[in-house]
């Protein structure tokens, strides 16, 4: 077996085609759009290249591609961890430990050459609400942005020495089951408290809402990490504009206290229900027509991508009132049958409790692993750093 860096157009095509061959007979796998995966590794479309670098490899066995992996460094985020840490992701491989270890070794060496002492995997070269974590429980068709992989990947990662850094849980809620009356009454009471207000997203005021999104998201995540690198307005604006064809404005909500944004809830129609009907991940003219046809007919569930409240508001009930806005909206959309609440980390039991209180059932578990390059270094799992802080 031998490795080859992804450089040429042919290499890039093979990187995209490998999972299509591996999962050909796997009914639960939904082929992501080629343009999306390609974009992650394109400096013109991924702003992470402004402060980072990424590389990809293919693994060949007798001129047949049997594995792939990517490695990346975000030079701003490398010190978010106890040791300088890079990432690996987009791993796909036949069920062969030798092949998997060759891929992991290659990513490790590249990261070590750049001063890294650890790598997270499998992760994204971007934000963590897409393409993040290894599926270990809940092998069913995934919502948009949630990774799917073969069950044997878990053994490949753990046999190499990756350790469980944190777990990510996805909850499902069947809307026809209704919501607890006590929760709804308390949310309604909180909603009416003086100073609190709620608004859903609108493209007519996209710049205002982009500002709210960035302010709230950065405030929340800077509480988790003292050296958090903030999102930029232009990146969120571009993401929203590029997703305009599938966004439902009434599913994205913001909470305010006296006009100040203090919380957000971002829910998107699960476009994977449409992408699954395209089959090959290519946006050909025919597939574009299919996309337009099924966009209004096939989507029966939505996915909560991001939910968060300022730390100092966590015990005020405003998160429940924020979800109450979504519940009222979904009642007016009978085509929506289910919501996936994903993902919440095992380090965030408060959000787990909220999902359980609204009737969500834990259905899927992904794991973000960490591999320390020096076995003498002490491993520590990720914890909620703002627990116990005073505000």
Image (tube, grey):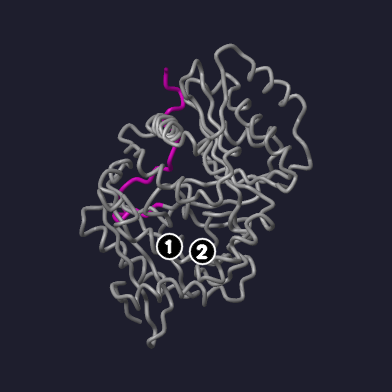
Q: Residue at x 36, y 38 (%)?
A: 233
- Point out the stretch of residues depicted in magenta: 370-391
Q: Residue furthest bottom?
A: 62
Label 2 environment density (alpha carbons within 10 Å; few <14, some 14–19, many ≥20) = many
Horizontal side of residue 276 vs 213, given as left or right: right
Q: Residue at x 42, y 74 (%)?
A: 67
Q: Residue at x 73, y 21 (%)?
A: 185
Above or below residue 92? Residue 63 is: below
Above or below residue 375? Residue 234 is: above
Above or below residue 46? Residue 212 is: above
Q: Is residue 376 magenta?
A: yes
Q: Which mark is residue 32?
A: 2
User: In what element is the residue under mark 1?
Assistant: helix
Residue 253's quadrant in the figure?
top right
Horizontal side of residue 363 vs 61, given as left or right: right
Residue 200, percent from left and from top: 56, 32
Q: Residue furthest front?
A: 204
The residue labelled by disc 1 is: 37
Quadrant in the picture for the N terminus? bottom left
What distance separates the C-alpha of mark 1 from that of mark 2? 7 Å
Q: Tell whether label 2 touches label 1 (CB within 8 Å).
A: yes
Residue 255's quadrant in the figure?
top right
User: In what element is the residue under mark 2?
Assistant: loop
Residue 39, percent from left and from top: 38, 60
Magenta portion: prevailing SS class: loop
Considering only order in the chain, which callout, 2 or 1, is on the residue closer to the N terminus? 2
Q: In this view of the protein, which residue sits in the foreground, 53 or 137?
A: 53
Residue 170, percent from left and from top: 60, 47
Horizontal side of residue 322 vs 182, given as left or right: left
Residue 219, percent from left and from top: 40, 29
């Amino acid at each position: 077996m031998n490795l080859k860096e992804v450089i040429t157009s042919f290499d890039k095509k093979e990187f995209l085609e490998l999972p299509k061959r591996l999962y050909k007979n796997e009914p639960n796998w939904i082929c992501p759009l080629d343009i999306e995966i390609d974009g992650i590794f394109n400096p013109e479309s991924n702003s992470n290249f402004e402060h980072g670098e990424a590389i990809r490899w293919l693994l060949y066995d007798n001129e047949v591609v049997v594995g792939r992996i990517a490695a990346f460094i975000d030079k701003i985020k490398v010190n978010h961890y106890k040791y300088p840490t890079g990432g690996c992701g987009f791993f796909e491989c036949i069920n062969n430990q030798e092949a998997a270890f060759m891929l992991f070794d290659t990513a490790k060496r590249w990261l070590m050459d750049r001063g890294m002492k650890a790598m997270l995997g499998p992760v994204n070269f971007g934000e963590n609400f897409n393409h993040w974590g290894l599926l270990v429980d809940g092998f069913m068709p995934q919502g948009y942005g949630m990774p799917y992989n073969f069950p044997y990947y878990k053994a490949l990662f753990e046999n190499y020495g990756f350790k469980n850094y944190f777990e990510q849980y996805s909850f499902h809620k069947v809307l026809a089951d209704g919501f607890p009356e006590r929760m709804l009454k308390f949310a309604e009471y909180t909603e009416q408290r003086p100073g609190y207000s709620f608004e859903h997203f609108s493209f007519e005021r996209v710049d205002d809402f982009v500002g709210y999104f960035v302010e709230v998201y950065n405030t929340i995540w800077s509480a988790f990490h003292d050296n958090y690198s903030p999102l930029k307005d232009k990146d969120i604006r571009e993401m929203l504009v590029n997703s305009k064809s599938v966004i439902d404005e009434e599913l994205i909500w913001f909470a305010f206290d006296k006009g100040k944004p203090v919380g957000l809830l971002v829910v998107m129609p699960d476009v994977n229900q449409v992408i699954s009907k395209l089959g090959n991940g290519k946006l050909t003219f025919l597939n574009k027509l299919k996309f337009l046809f099924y966009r209004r007919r096939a989507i029966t569930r939505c996915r909560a991508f991001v939910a968060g409240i300022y730390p100092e508001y966590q015990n005020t009930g405003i998160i429940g009132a924020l979800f109450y806005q979504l519940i009222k909206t979904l009642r007016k959309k009978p085509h929506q049958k289910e919501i996936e609440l994903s993902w919440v980390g095992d380090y965030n039991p408060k959000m787990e409790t909220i999902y359980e209180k609204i009737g969500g059932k834990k259905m899927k578990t992904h794991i973000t692993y960490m591999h320390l390059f020096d076995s003498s270094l002490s491993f520590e799992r990720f914890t909620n750093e703002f627990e116990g802080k005073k505000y």
